[in-house]
Image (tube, grey):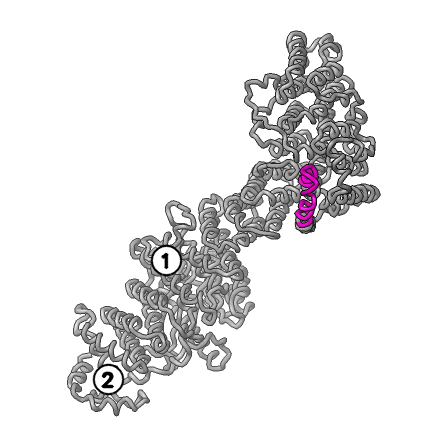
Amino acid sequence: MSFVKCCFESSEGHDFLDSFVQKCTDPGCCCGCCSALRPRYKRLVDNIFPASPQDGLVKSNMEKLTFYSLSSPEKLDRIGEYLFQKASRDIYRRRHGFVIIAMEAMDQLLLACHSQTLNLFVESFLKMVQKLLESTDPQLQILATQSFVRFANIEEDTPSYHRRYDFFVSKFSAMCHSNHSDKSTRDNIRLAGIQGLQGVIRKTVSDDLVENIWEAQHMDKIVPSLLYNMQTAEKYETVSCMETDTRDGFEEDPPRLAEACLRELVGRAAFGHIRSVLRPVLTHFDRHELWVPNDFAVHTFKIIMFSIQAQYSYSVVEALMQHLDVGAPGNVDARARTRVRAARAAVLSNIVAIAAGDSVGPSVLEIINNLLTNLRASVARDSEKESDERLYQEALINALGEFADHLPDFQKIDIMMFIVSKIPSQRGKSTKADAMLQSILLKSLLKVGTTYKTTELSKAFPAAFLDALLRLSSAGEPATRALLQRILHTLLDRRGNATVLVTPTVEYAELGLIVEKCSRPDLIFISKHGYAIFSSLYDGLQLESNVAENVSAIYTTLALLCVELSSEETVCDMLQLILSIQHSAISNPVLSTAQQCQLHAITAALAALVPHVLLLPRLQEYINQIIEARREEAPHMLPPLQESYEHLSPSKMPNKMPYLMIDQMALGDCLKAHGIEASRLQSASPYSGGANLAHRHSWVEAGAAQGRDSLADISAGPNAELVDSANSSPGVQRHPLQLENVSLEALRRAASGPSEAEKREAERRKVTLNNAFRTAPFDHLLHLTQPKYEIKDKLEEIFNSLSEEPLLAGAGVLAGGGSPGAKCHSQQLPAYTKYFPELFLY
Amino acid sequence: MEDYKFLFKVVLVGNAGVGKTCLVRRFTQGLFPPGQGATIGVDFMIKTVEVDGEKVKLQIWDTAGQERFRSITQSYYRSAHALILVYDISCQPTFDCLPDWLREIEEYANNKVLRILVGNKTDREDREIPRHIGEDFAQRHGMYFLETSAKEAENVERLFMEIAVELMEQAKCKELPKYDGSLGPINGKTSSVGDGSCCLR
């Protein structure tokens, strides 16, 4: 060195030689022995080094070098090469002070240079960085990383196709796993490693032309390195997406920086790259056995969910779901596997909500379907004794609920319909696994149902959905039936009354029920489906296997129906049902004494609820008399329900005390006193008969009933009595002509000729009847074909858009016809949207 | 000083505790660290050797033997020119695992990779695997075989030198898969430049 220096000094003033030397491109010719012939750039470079490394970079000479390289950028590559060679020698001789100075000089040149000319210099620069990284000295490694990060933050405008980052990824990943004996050194090396990885990511991710960082060979190193550092954190605080902008990368501890880096990586991942990030994540969790306990897994996956581009978030869910069942290599213990599976499902339930907000269309059903498939697989494994399997199922159901919770309401209904369609029918030979699956799917349904906020009953219960639910209400297992009732509760209850109506009572005054007038669409709904619902509930009460829970659950359903649909128009149906239940309690031979008493008790409870809700004092008075009488003579015929009534003496048997029964005639009188048409009460009870036949009303009947009811709806208009009379003879196909009822509106309508609405109504009636007859012969097909809801949705959409336009026009035409016509229109709308899709359902 | 003709990547694999790190340390630093802790993830060392008057740079990636780091270590197999599979001659289980390791190498490494089987710890008295068993195994699977002792520095130098020689021969026959020149991140030209500085030595 001293030789070089002295030569160098003596060469001052020989600048005129430079032009000569520079023409000489072959490096071999410039023999250093003649210092005068040394190129100028070499002298400039040599000048920046002080005599002793402690003195640091010679600032003024560094400025000269910078100026020189700016004015003649074509020299940059040689400057770089020369600096690199000098530094290599210094590393070899362990003169680290000079190495640091050389690196500093390179950094400064890098920052000072224009990007066009940088490309040539960068190669030497990176060689230098690599050289430093190859040394065993932590200090040099850290220094090199810092330089690399500085380089990574420079935006180059020309891509360099030939540059490879292979070594850097490998080395930085190795640094992330540093095992240096000194803790602070170790942390510093790890930090440097993470920063380096961050730099590589930044450098490569934005440019498609340079190395593809998303390739497995890189991701398999980067991702585990980050995770390994993250998992060493003492506690995991998951912060949401807001605080992800710690982009400067100068965090103090490795776990935090690793987390920031992971966020950045995930945030930059395009759709095609997500899998390549997730796969190493999942493998890492398997290898390091980080699923149980799953704190860290939850933490990591939340971070991923928070930082991933929102539209891709469902693919994380998808990947995790597919991984649910994947066994860790070398792990054959079945119990451990189940535990891992449960833990994964728990992670899933933690993140699924984050995905729900951004999921659209088929991906939603995809996720649900996947969850259900996993549930089914779990049931098929059938390990009841294993509580872990239970935990797994619970976690999956939770995930389902979490997911549904964050979806808009209309999708919830879709999902519920979807789940219902997956429930095995109870008609076939019901195996134990089937029953279990049934109950698990119902649990899922309940979970989804509780997240749904019912506004209109007709929206909450599309016909196909309601039908499926009612069909299930006669399932074999009492617990399953109770579950189903709970689903009905959660869907029916709009005003938070379900909790107070859980157990039967006769004292409603202090319960503080919230009762509102029944809305018109609800009334239409109940007049359409009321018979089906009531008869299914009635049938549900006639089952031999009922326990008190079933009875009280059905009571709650009925009570909720009564509260939600409180209307003078429905009171007769309700009372009729109550009378039927009372009758069955006496006459049904399969019922035990306990069941009979329970039925009487809920009869009394319901009978007391009706006048309370509708404010019918006369009726209330009558019911109170009966309750008082029962309270004195037969308290077992009042709530609360008991599991057994063994102490009962034969004389106290309910059928021995006809005078304690609710009397049909008396009820009729009370209603009449309140001005309510009660003739229907007198007619024969539609519910009696073959009590246990679940599908007593065939499809033809149901279809016809719908046709008839909708007829009644329209023709009745605001006139309630016609609805009642139409409903009063179920099972009988009546043909009430629309103009039969000579009301003011009817006359007006007749005068204005067949309106738009009526024409359409006629059309629709035709279609509905057609449908009814068409479905009948294909009854058996219903079992074979599954409802295709997507098609249904599409059709619904189309019909909505179709029906809206003419509606507007029709309203215009009818404006002259007066308001009643328009009213008909508005009532028609829900019916319209409901009927057509049904046509295409099966 | 810096110029070298070839750069080869050597990866060491094998069960935990067979002495991979000690072999590397012995070779690169000439020392035997007693009480060497388990490697985490991957460690990296470099050593330049001379073969037939030509400089050969060996990039040595020393992987962790522990099962849990298997996924990250596997990712290093791919770019390796030579894989050293190490077992402990005084520990039967480390030998029994060899087929598993071979399967992994088969799956993740380049199929032309040079494979060397090394039985380490020959200094130990309690040998469990006789030399010929190891030799047989190596022969059956087309591997080179060597027994070493990192502690006594026995055969360690020879191991790496033979690898360098073999790889160089391969490279000269152009059999070696090209990993974009001899310098990792930089294009291949650089291996032949730099001679101009000879005068400064």
Residue A56 screen position, x and y as percent: 19, 69
- Looking at marks 1 and 2 on the same chain, the residue that comes earlier in the sequence is marked by 2
Q: Chain of mark 2?
A: A
Residue on which disc 2 sits: A40
Residue A495 screen position, x and y as percent: 57, 30
Left or right side of A240 for A480: right
Quadrant (top left, top right, bottom left, bottom right) of the N terminus of chain A? bottom left
Label 2 amino acid? Arg
Main SS class of the magenta portion in the image:
helix
Asked whether residue A659 is drawn in magenta, I would say: no
Residue on which disc 1 sits: A247
The answer to whether residue A484 of the structure is visible from this angle is: yes
Quarter assignment of residue A667: top right
Q: Residue furthest right?
A: A777
Q: Measured along the vertical axis of the image, is residue A682 above or below residue A128?
A: above
- Looking at the rendered structure, which numbered label has been put on residue A583? none
Q: Residue furthest bottom?
A: A20
Q: Please name the residue shown 42% across and 48% down the image.
A: A240
| Secondary structure of the residue carrying numbered label 2 | helix
Q: Chain of mark 1?
A: A
Residue A518 screen position, x and y as percent: 63, 30
| Secondary structure of the residue carrying numbered label 1 | loop
Q: Nearer the viewer, residue B46 or A592?
A: A592
Q: Nearer the viewer, residue A624 or A263?
A: A624
- Segment tinted magenta in the rendering: A805-826
